[in-house]
Image (cartoon, rainbow, N blue to C red):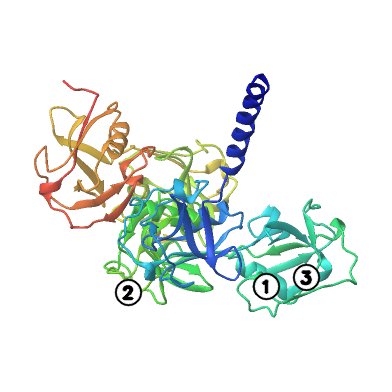
Amino acid sequence: MLRMMGRCPMFIILSAVVIIITADRVNVRLVGGHSRCAGTVEVLHRGQWGTVCDLAWDLAEAAVVCKELGCGEPVDALGNAHFGQGSGPIWMSFVRCIGFESTLKDCRSAGWDQNICNHANDAGVICSGVRLVGGSRCSGRLEILHDQTWMSVCDAVFDQQDAEVVCRELDCGAPVQVLGAAAFDKGDTQMWTQEIQCKGNESQIHLCPTSPSHENNCSYENDVGLMCAEIINVRLVNGNNPCSGTVEVHHRGQWGTVCGDGWDLAAAAVVCRELDCGDPVDALSDAQVGLGSGPVWMNNAICSGSESTLKKCGSVIWGFQGVCQSKSAGVICSGVRLVGGSHCSGRLEILHDQTWMSVCAAVFDQQDAEVVCRELDCGAPVQVLGAAAFDKGDAQMWTQEIQCRGNESQIHLCPTSLSHKYNCSHDNDVGLVCADRVNVRLVGGHSRCAGRVEVLHRGQWGTVCDAAWDMTEAAVVCRELDCGEPVDALGDAYFGPGSGPIWTNRMLCTGSETTLKNCGSVQWFGYDCNHGTDAGVICSGELF
């Protein structure tokens, strides 16, 4: 009996160990593709594998799947049962990932087992299975995924045609250089020694034939390195300069447009930053920009505004056709910025021929300042300063005389003329202080911290629709107005109906934004709502 009692604790401890080890199971898999890194997405839930609906399925969700499987970067997010229809339950639909999740099951969705789709809508993913390490996204030591193991590649089995495939797979430009002699340091992974025999037109390195190679003496001294061109994945066309026009995205080797449905200032901010074009002036739909050509790659882009590239934003539908009402999204970026101060004050720099240039104080006056302050969505100019008031810049010097009338919407629309009479140097860099204009206000309440929400856009005050309006959005408004914490987020024109445009429909704030205009939204300048659904806020500050 004592002997049995002595064994029981050991049995319990061992059982606990078994539970801990077996609990770390894989919760997602890809089936029906050419490798474990491509196929229909299946999720394990309640002990049963089921599929995922392709509604709102895009590269943000694909990135989480590829990361979870240790499969490198996402190449494509696919729908319409691209790899064949699955069976069993459709576990997830309308999945919304932000890209930081460790597993797909941590992403938000419409709920488990909400069967609003059928298996003809099963989502799929293609992951790269190749990566460049020790450099940048488009350069580094080459590693290939084989049998769930990342392997370094011997330079003797890799050539220019293979490099073309890898660069294409990683959504980079053409190969610039193939390097040997461990140019990006020696790897500590296993060594891939099979000869890769790409023709050069394959979409992925795993689709290239291979053959055993015994004639090469491979070691980590022979790790292959690769430099691809850093391709631009977004551009603006048909505008009056490189920083305005119809948005086009490069995907699957082809330029296509972005649907204007749901296009907003948060998405425009990502495009302007990616193109180094300053801040967004406006987000436009095909009513204001020319129609694009080619496929419509993104529909209802959902950006937080902080993404480094538009392709990292979510979208309701990626790469599907025939679902867009406003055929083309457009952007106007400022092409002007104030450096070394705040958003509305600093040393003036103007973008010219894709180069930021400092401006000589002698060629800039009060009327020019009015245009710049308006373009940056700041108030009226407070002061124009010379003598490098915000330190000397190291950019090239703009010396043409700017001749604004003062009513232009952008500085690039002002006439200029060559001027040789001024002696300009960085000691004469012009600085500008604009009034830091408030872009949101609360109207109709008992204090400035309570009332109907109104937003200033395109020089006009308009309201906000109460669709999806909650305490997260209210928190941004209260912070922007320095009104403390949100007490309530209200709808149904609680503070009375407004007038004028309804600027936003269905705001999508994270709560950390500094201004409501930096939040995403399903649609700017949309009229799915009416003034009977104007949103309101009560903040804790100035309650009486």
Any part of residue 276 in sight? no
Give the residue at x 30% y 63%. 261
**Helix, strand, or loop for circle 2?**
loop
**Given the image, on which type of amino acid does mark 1 rest?**
Glu
**Helix, strand, or loop for circle 3?**
loop
CA–CA distance in space, label 3 to label 1: 11 Å
Any part of residue 20 in sight? yes
CA–CA distance in space, label 2 to label 3: 42 Å
Residue denoted by label 3: 158
Residue denoted by label 2: 322
> Residue 79 versus residue 279: which sits nearer the camera?
79
Position of residue 14 measured from the top left corner of the image (x, y, whole percent): 64, 33
Mark 3 surroundings within 10 Å by alpha-carbon count, few (fewer than 14), some (14 through 19), many (20 or more) = many
Mark 2 surroundings within 10 Å by alpha-carbon count, few (fewer than 14), some (14 through 19), many (20 or more) = few
Give the residue at x 62% y 38%. 18
Residue denoted by label 1: 164
- Is the residue under label 1 in contact with that under label 2 (CB below 8 Å)? no
Is 66 located above or below residue 215 in the figure? Answer: above
- First in sequence, mark 2 or 1: give its number: 1
Give the image quarter of residue 9.
Answer: top right
CA–CA distance in space, label 2 to label 1: 32 Å
**Given the image, on which type of amino acid does mark 2 rest?**
Gly
Left or right: where 266 falls relative to 223: left
- First in sequence, mark 3 or 1: give its number: 3
